[in-house]
């Protein structure tokens, strides 16, 4: 069982027609996207989140209720509005973000829900909450409870320096929490931010902790897995990219769904299994970019299997 805790928010994806920009509304938030991916690919998942008691919050709650999670624990917050992310895509589908996130709902969790940590094997925590003191206190409580319960902690860096006072502060905060993770995902850009080494393998040797399972996404080149100086790499496929929003979340949801199925210890000791899982996750991430929306674009298992035969 995977427990995902963190932001669920609205992605407002812009499109320009005749000089006017309009926005389509999609459910989003990295840990929520990951949770949807886990369930989509056959994993067992619980999601804990918080939204405002407003139009957008009720839209998200209705959307989440239709995802068939093993358990869904989302509060409607009457004191904080739902968090919004405005998304702009360039011609290659690459996106940039602007957050409406001042005193919004995404990290004001009902701490009673953290009792669900006992029912999980892996606890995946969103990193958006780390950008302010209240959110870090919440993350500290989650991590402390996870460690005391003997569960594995998962993080996806999802580096965002625009919601910090400075890039230097952001790097320091992310590094602190990355050191606590048992399972972690970086993009290549993030790896280069946190390491003084230019070579990928030297960088991984520098920043990875003993017994820390590291996944590194390499864009069109695929991905790799690093564990105690052992590296397994897998290539991806070429697709016509429309929107890269949520591609990394889809990749990681696929990874965690397979870890839930295989088990951590069985996974790390078999390089052939690791390679198969990376291939599956690469296909998932690539196919997600061919449609708009992080969750609406998730491919089905049938679509993925057409590329694995």
Image (cartoon, rainbow, N blue to C red):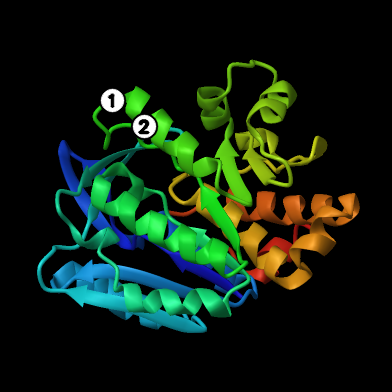
Question: In this rendering, is residue 282 above or below 255?
Answer: above
Q: Pointers 1 and 2 in contact (CB under 8 A)?
A: yes
Farthest residue in the left direction? 79
Q: Which residue is mark 2?
A: 170
Tell me how many marks there are.
2
Nearer-the-camera pick, 247 or 109: 109
Dot 1 alpha-carbon crowd within 10 angstroms: few under 14, some 14 to 19, many 20 or more: few
Instruction: Assign the C terminus to one quadrant of the image.
Output: bottom right
Q: Which residue is mark 1?
A: 166
Disc 2 is placed on an element classified as helix
Disc 1 is placed on an element classified as loop
Question: In this rendering, is residue 279 above or below 296?
Answer: above
Q: Is residue 103 visible?
A: yes
In percent of width and height, residue 305 lies at 75, 65
Residue 295 occupies quadrant: bottom left
Question: In this rendering, is residue 145 above or below 98?
Answer: below
Q: Is residue 287 visible?
A: no
Question: In this rendering, is residue 59 above or below 225?
Answer: below
The residue at 42%/55% (across/down) is 126
C-alpha separation, residue under disc 1 versus residue under disc 2: 6 Å
In percent of width and height, residue 78 lies at 11, 73
The residue at 66%/65% (across/down) is 303
């Amino acid at each position: 069982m995977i427990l995902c805790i963190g932001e669920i928010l609205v992605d407002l994806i812009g499109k320009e027609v005749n000089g006017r920009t309009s926005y389509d509304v999609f459910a989003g938030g990295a840990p929520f996207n990951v949770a949807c991916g886990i369930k989509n690919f056959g994993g067992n998942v619980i999601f804990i989140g918080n939204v405002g008691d407003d139009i957008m919050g009720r839209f998200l709650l209705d959307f989440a209720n239709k995802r068939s999670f093993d358990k869904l624990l989302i509060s409607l917050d009457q004191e904080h509005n739902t968090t919004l992310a405005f998304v702009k895509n360039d011609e290659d589908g690459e996106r940039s973000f602007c957050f409406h996130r001042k005193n919004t709902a995404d990290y004001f969790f009902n701490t009673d829900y953290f009792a669900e940590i006992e029912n999980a094997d892996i606890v995946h925590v969103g990193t958006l909450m780390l950008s302010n003191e209240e959110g870090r206190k919440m993350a500290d409580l989650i991590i402390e409870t996870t460690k005391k319960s003997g569960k594995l902690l998962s993080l996806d860096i999802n580096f965002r320096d625009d919601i910090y006072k400075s890039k230097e502060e952001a790097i320091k905060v992310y590094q602190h929490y990355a050191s606590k993770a048992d399972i972690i995902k970086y993009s290549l850009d993030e790896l280069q931010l946190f390491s003084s080494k230019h070579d990928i393998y030297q960088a991984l040797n520098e920043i990875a902790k003993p017994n820390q399972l590291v996944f590194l996404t390499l864009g069109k080149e695929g991905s790799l897995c690093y564990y105690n100086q052992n590296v397994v790499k897998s290539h991806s496929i070429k697709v016509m990219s429309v929107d890269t929003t949520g591609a990394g979340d889809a990749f990681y949801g696929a990874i965690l769904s397979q870890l839930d199925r295989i088990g951590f210890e069985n996974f790390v000791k078999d390089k052939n299994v690791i390679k198969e899982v990376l291939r599956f996750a690469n296909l998932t991430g690539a196919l997600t970019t061919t449609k708009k929306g992080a969750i609406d674009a998730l491919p089905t298992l049938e679509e993925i299997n057409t590329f694995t035969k």
